[in-house]
Amino acid sequence: MEGVVGQSGHLVGIIGAGPAGLYAAQKLSEAGVYVVLFNQDIKPGGLAEYGIFPTKYKMKEGLRKQFRRILAHPRVEYYGNCRVGEKGALTLDDLHALGLDALICAAGAQGTKSLGLPGEEAVGVVHAKDLVYHYNRLPPFSQQQFAIGKRVAIVGMGNVMIDIAHYLLQLRHDVAEVIVVARRGPAERRYDAKEYTYVEPFVDQTALRHEIERLRPHLAAVGQDTTALIAAMTTATPPARPAGAPGRLVFRFLASPVEILSTPDGRVCGLRVEENRLVLHNETLTARGTGTYMEIPLDSVIFAIGDCVDETIGLPYAHGTFLTKPDASTAEQASAVYQVYDPIRHRVLDHTYVVGWSRQASDGLVGKAKQDAERGVDTVLRELATVPTPTARVVAARRQAVQRLVEERCGYPVTREDITLLEGAEQHMATQAQLADYKFDSNEAMIKAINSRKIARG
Ligand SMILES: Cc1cc2nc3c(=O)[nH]c(=O)nc-3n(C[C@H](O)[C@H](O)[C@H](O)COP(=O)(O)OP(=O)(O)OC[C@H]3O[C@@H](n4cnc5c(N)ncnc54)[C@H](O)[C@@H]3O)c2cc1C
């Protein structure tokens, strides 16, 4: 607990140990700051552990290695299984009462964005994040059942859509058709070309050519080249489909969902969409409804339209985001975007910051979350330079107070030593089952594995 006395010696709390929280902890600890991470999940890593596609073993393991190094720093304390907020074991007031020199929210975007369509409560409507957590084995989603039928629409055209399609068509073998429903056209696809290669074997090339051709007048109206788009999106020699994976992937462009249709017993049976045209105004391209509607028969609808932050954490919030200072001057801008803003008192909250997907929901890859966290920490360090440095004794007392609080409130707070034991147990299971990766899929099983290893160690 005494640790190393660094050049700063301040104590900073971070809510969330996903990439943003962990890279923030790295930069702070290297600057001599003590850090305590409060993480809702037992394991660290956030979406790097529970979002990135399960078969990207190399990428996941590379990130895990970096995260292990960050957590091993003597100035970094980790408490998993400790949720912060109105629904958690710890509230923001609890954390403020600990006398932290700064508090950073790096809790990702845990809220669910919805289009508010009639019929969204039907069985078979699924939000992408929940399904992603399910197939990456994050409790409690790992143990939930999702009603996925044979014909599935995915609403949205970004990288998450690709992952969901990849899961449905390659890891499951019971989906016959995935229909990507996109508000705008093929030129506005948001996924990365590299990610597309994962689903390319499943794309019905003939159907895609016809679909883009169908849009020719709309595309021409905004100066887009249909032939070039067909050439960019299709291939005469598609990669071979993996054995035992019979499903196909088709696109439905320029279609906005307006209603989810369901059977009398409340199951999804279709999606009603309004057909759109593209409108170019002041160099901005938008989709406008044409007043023509059509129904697509299907069994499940998965929304992959991005997420919003979890307002129950308790920070000032509006329209899916935590508030940072509006209309900051250019000079203030770099700092202001990371400082949480109280719109009632018209001022930034003292020593309270937001980084990563908690600042910009669903924005970019791990590299971007890292960059954002590091920029946020620059702001924090600038402010800490104006705060008197606590003595080593004061910091040690505060760290002990944190430990007492989490032990009192969090039931079974999981430390970095526990994580090492858990990883050992999972590695053992993977070796025994000859799997590349193994994850316990409930908190109870994880805690049991940690305790068994503790007992075995004596
Ligand atoms: C489906 C999907 C696939 C992706 N694939 C890739 C990829 O292949 N490559 C890539 O580079 N990037 C990928 N990304 C993006 C990448 O995962 C994100 O950029 C990154 O994880 C965002 O980091 P974050 O720390 O801001 O949020 P998160 O990763 O969401 O981490 C948030 C952390 O906060 C914790 N938390 C949440 N609420 C609370 C609370 N109330 N109290 C305490 N703790 C809390 C959570 O337990 C979690 O550990 C993918 C994202 C998704 C959704």
Image (tube, rainbow, N blue to C red):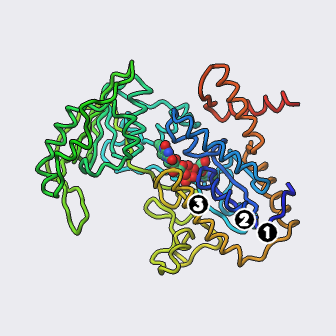
Image position of 91 with respect to 254: above or below: below
Q: Quadrant of the N terminus?
A: bottom right
Whichever of labels 2 and 3 marks the residue nearer the N terminus, that label is 2
Using the image as rendered, state which of residue 83 and residue 250 is in the foreground. Answer: 250
Relative placement, left or right, of 33 versus 270 is right
Residues under numbered marks 2 and 3 in contact, where contact means CB atoms less than 8 Å apart: no
Image position of 359 with respect to 193: above or below: below
| Mark 2 residue CB less than 8 A from any atom of ligand 1 | no
- The residue to which callout 1 is attached is 7
Relative placement, left or right, of 194 versus 217 is right
Q: Give the structural element (helix, strand or loop) at label 3.
A: helix
Which of the 4 image quarters holds residue 47?
A: top right
Q: Give the structural element (helix, strand or loop) at label 2.
A: loop
The answer for how far apart the CA atoms under marks 2 and 3 are is 14 Å
The answer for how far apart the CA atoms under marks 2 and 1 are is 7 Å
Whichever of labels 1 and 3 marks the residue nearer the N terminus, that label is 1
- The residue to which callout 2 is attached is 31
| Mark 3 residue CB less than 8 A from any atom of ligand 1 | yes
Which of the 4 image quarters holds residue 48?
A: top right
Decide if residue 266 is in sight here: no
Please name the amino acid that badge 1 sits on: Gln
Q: Residue furthest front?
A: 237
Please name the amino acid that badge 3 sits on: Ala
- The residue to which callout 3 is attached is 373
Q: Quadrant of the C terminus?
A: top right
Please name the amino acid that badge 2 sits on: Ala
Label 1 neighbourhood size at 10 Å, few (<14), some (14-19), many (20+)? few
Q: Position of residue 52 (x, y in %)?
A: 51, 41
Residues under numbered marks 2 and 1 in contact, where contact means CB atoms less than 8 Å apart: yes
